[in-house]
Image (cartoon, rainbow, N blue to C red):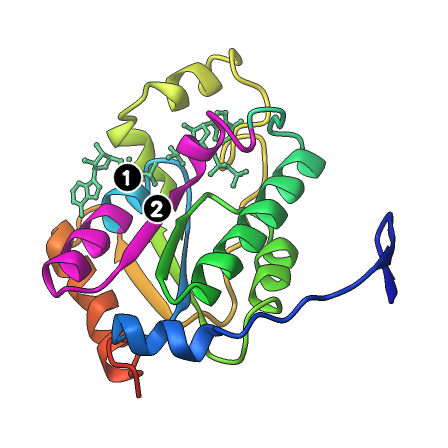
């Protein structure tokens, strides 16, 4: 019997079928691919491209996209620091469940604060959290401005916009970095996905043992 947060007198119930059995069924290993970067960095594009590539290889993946989750699970949250932290915490917990279900869970959120990303990492067994930093410069993101949000932020019509008047803390030690800088060759979405899928292949996530 234990107390966790505000939950008192609670018990953990173990089921007969566990992660190992589910992984055998799926011929893969559950893990979390966590994509972080500025708005417009290419996170959703990469997430969908990785998802499609894995699907074509017969692997079960699921994308948790920040923007999409804010339409449901996280619709009560805004963009102040505490709300972003709670957003990341919830998605980290959901991603952990997906990984435990045996899926390759691809989470794609700005997740601007290092502490929140590290807390998600600590929820997973060693090596099962693969952090991908979309190192796309602010200049490139702003030039793309696919949703017109940078223009609004520069005009002061959106307050606390990441990269403009709200911080983004780049990872110090992540598994994969994808560079997209102005004036440099920019990898295609499928080349970027290839980099991630090769990593998963090399580390054995695309096989059950
Ligand atoms: N203030 C502010 N700062 C940053 N982004 C903003 C903001 N307001 C709205 N948006 C839109 O919300 C999307 C980011 O949601 P996330 O859940 O990924 O953000 S966070 O991880 O909680 O910081 C982000 O989507 P992406 O462009 O896909 O990153 C924006 O479309
Ligand atoms: N590798 C790439 N090369 C060129 N354009 C890209 C690439 N990846 C994404 N984009 C474009 O950049 C814009 C933002 O991409 P998106 O995936 O929505 O970013 P995010 O999810 O980080 O906000 C979109 O218009 C998308 O088509």
Question: Is label 1 in a helix, a strand or a loop?
Answer: helix
The residue positioned 41% from the left and 68% from the top of the image is 31
**Quadrant of residue 150 within the rendered picture:** top left
Q: Furthest residue to the front?
A: 16
Residue that mark 1 sits on: 140
Label 1 – label 2 distance at C-alpha: 5 Å
Judged left or right of residue 205, residue 36 is right
Counting every numbered tag in the picture gives 2
Residue 204 position, x and y percent, is 29, 83
Q: In which quarter of the image is the C terminus?
A: bottom left
- Asked if 37 appears above or below 118 in the picture, the reply is above
Residue 194 position, x and y percent, is 16, 65
**Quadrant of residue 121 within the rendered picture:** bottom right
Is residue 23 in sight in this rendering? yes
Residue 63 position, x and y percent, is 34, 48
- Asked if 83 appears above or below 207 in the picture, the reply is above
Ligand 2 is found in the corner quadrant, namely top left
Residue 82 position, x and y percent, is 71, 37
Circles 1 and 2: CB atoms closer than 8 Å: yes
The residue positioned 16% from the left and 52% from the top of the image is 52
Q: Quadrant of the N terminus?
A: bottom right
Q: Is residue 155 magenta?
A: no
Instruction: Tell me the crowding category of disc 1: few under 14, some 14 to 19, or many 20 or more residues within 10 angstroms, Cα based.
Output: some
Residue in the foreground of this view, choosing between 169 and 125: 125
Judged left or right of residue 96, residue 188 is left
Residue that mark 2 sits on: 137
Q: Which residues fall within the magenta stretch? A: 47-74
Is residue 181 in sight in this rendering? no
Instruction: Tell me the crowding category of disc 2: few under 14, some 14 to 19, or many 20 or more residues within 10 angstroms, Cα based.
Output: some
Residue in the foreground of this view, choosing between 178 and 103: 103
């Amino acid at each position: 019997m234990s107390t966790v947060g505000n939950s008192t007198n609670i018990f953990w119930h173990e089921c007969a079928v566990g992660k190992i059995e589910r992984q055998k069924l799926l011929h893969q290993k559950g893990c979390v691919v966590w994509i972080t970067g500025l708005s417009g960095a290419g996170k959703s594009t990469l997430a969908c491209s990785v998802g499609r590539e894995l699907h074509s290889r017969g692997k079960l993946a699921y994308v948790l996209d920040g923007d999409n989750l804010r339409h449901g699970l996280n619709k009560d949250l805004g963009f102040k620091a505490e709300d972003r932290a709670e957003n990341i915490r919830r998605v980290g917990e959901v991603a952990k469940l997906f990984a435990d279900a045996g899926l390759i869970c691809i989470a794609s959120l700005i997740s601007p604060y290092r502490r929140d990303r590290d807390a998600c990492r600590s929820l997973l067994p060693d090596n099962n959290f693969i952090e991908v930093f979309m190192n796309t410069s602010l200049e490139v993101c702003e030039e793309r401005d696919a949703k017109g949000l940078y223009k609004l932020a520069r005009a002061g019509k959106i307050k606390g916009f990441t990269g403009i008047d709200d911080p983004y803390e780049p990872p110090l030690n992540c598994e994969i970095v994808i560079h997209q800088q102005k004036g440099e060759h920019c990898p295609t979405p499928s080349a970027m996905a290839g980099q991630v899928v090769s990593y998963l292949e090399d580390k054995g996530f695309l096989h059950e043992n």
